[in-house]
């Protein structure tokens, strides 16, 4: 797993790449905790996210809670069908804002 | 012995072994032309089961062995996971409430929820030497071997 971070408009743009399993999810969680404290508006590019376990979902949940607490914005985009299914089974599709692509995510209304 | 159909792997109780487990799943599934979507589900379910055992299965800090056996026939894949940890039936764990509000959501219990939903059958057996979990995934029409 790798994470890349950049900027687009007023958003921090974060790309999660590869496989997030239970072994490396702790480093993702350390990152999302730091990111959630530092940023207010975040877009997460999941186009290169191949795999995510429940521990990885936990790292994203931490981020969502931090952002919601301060009234910020967190949007995920470009989830593969497999990752979309994992989100749906976990019930995470109910409270994460998920968009088909970057354009839809950055142009969405708060 | 590993035959074309059956594979056995012995892993240490360490999350570092997840990479090896993933390789074995991939090899087993590809050799049997199992659909990548099915492979993904088996891979994820085993990740969750293995992680639960490593994190919560032992009362000591000694090294332990976890044995994973794969069997396939034309209709399904059967995987058993044996550990020598304390008695624990994950199927009796409280169900996760996937309709809870985000502030109430916890990750605990989510792993076994995913396992149940990704696979077709999950069975637990308490054995004299430890626990056995049996996972069964039925294969789609396009994956069935004649």
Image: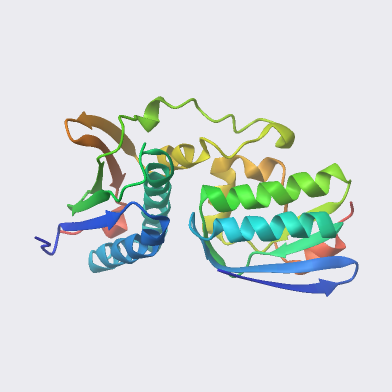
Choose top left, top right, bottom left or bottom right for residue B89: top left
Tell me if residue B36 comes above or below residue A86 in the rendering.
below
Residue B36 is situated, as x and y percent measured from the top left of the image, at: 39, 63
Q: Nearer the viewer, residue B86 or B20?
A: B86
The C terminus of chain B sits in image quarter: bottom left
Question: Residue at position x 44%, y 27% from top?
Answer: B93
Q: Nearer the viewer, residue A44 or A58?
A: A58
Tell me if residue B57 comes above or below residue A48 in the rendering.
above
Q: Nearer the viewer, residue A98 or B131?
A: B131
- Does the rendering let one see residue A62? yes
Position of B1 compared to B138: left or right? Answer: left
Question: Residue at position x 72%, y 37% from top?
Answer: B102
Residue B14 is situated, as x and y percent measured from the top left of the image, at: 38, 55
Colour scheme employed for the rendering of this structure: rainbow
The N terminus of chain B sits in image quarter: bottom left
Question: Residue at position x 87%, y 51% from top?
Answer: A72
Question: Residue at position x 74%, y 48% from top?
Answer: A64
Total residue callouts? 0
Position of A21 compared to A99: left or right? Answer: left
Tell me if residue B145 comes above or below residue B52 in the rendering.
below
- Does the rendering let one see residue B34? no
Q: Residue furthest front?
A: B61
Q: Nearer the viewer, residue B25 or B131?
A: B131
Choose top left, top right, bottom left or bottom right for residue B144: bottom left
Residue B15 is situated, as x and y percent measured from the top left of the image, at: 41, 56
């Amino acid at each position: 797993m790798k994470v890349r971070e950049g900027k687009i408009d007023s958003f921090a743009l974060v790309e999660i790449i590869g496989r997030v399993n239970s072994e490396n999810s702790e480093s993702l969680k350390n990152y999302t905790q730091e990111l959630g404290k530092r940023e207010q508006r975040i877009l997460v590019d999941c186009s290169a996210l191949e795999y995510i376990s429940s521990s990885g979902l936990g790292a994203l949940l931490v981020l969502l809670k931090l952002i919601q607490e301060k009234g910020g914005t967190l949007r995920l985009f470009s989830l593969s069908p497999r990752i979309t299914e994992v989100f749906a089974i976990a019930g995470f599709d109910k409270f994460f804002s998920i968009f088909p692509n970057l354009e839809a995510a950055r142009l969405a209304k708060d | 012995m590993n035959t074309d159909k059956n594979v056995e792997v012995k892993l240490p109780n360490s999350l570092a072994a997840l990479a090896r487990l993933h390789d074995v799943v991939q090899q087993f599934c590809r050799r049997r032309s199992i659909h990548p979507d099915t492979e993904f589900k088996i891979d994820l379910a085993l990740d969750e089961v293995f992680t639960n055992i490593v994190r919560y299965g032992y009362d000591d800090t000694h090294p332990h062995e976890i044995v994973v056996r794969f069997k396939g026939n034309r209709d399904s894949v059967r995987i058993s996971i044996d550990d020598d940890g304390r008695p624990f039936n994950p199927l009796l764990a409280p169900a996760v409430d996937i309709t809870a509000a985000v502030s109430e959501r916890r990750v605990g219990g989510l792993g076994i929820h995913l396992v149940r939903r990704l696979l077709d059958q999950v069975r637990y057996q308490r054995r004299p030497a430890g626990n056995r979990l049996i996972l069964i995934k039925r294969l789609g029409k396009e994956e069935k071997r004649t």
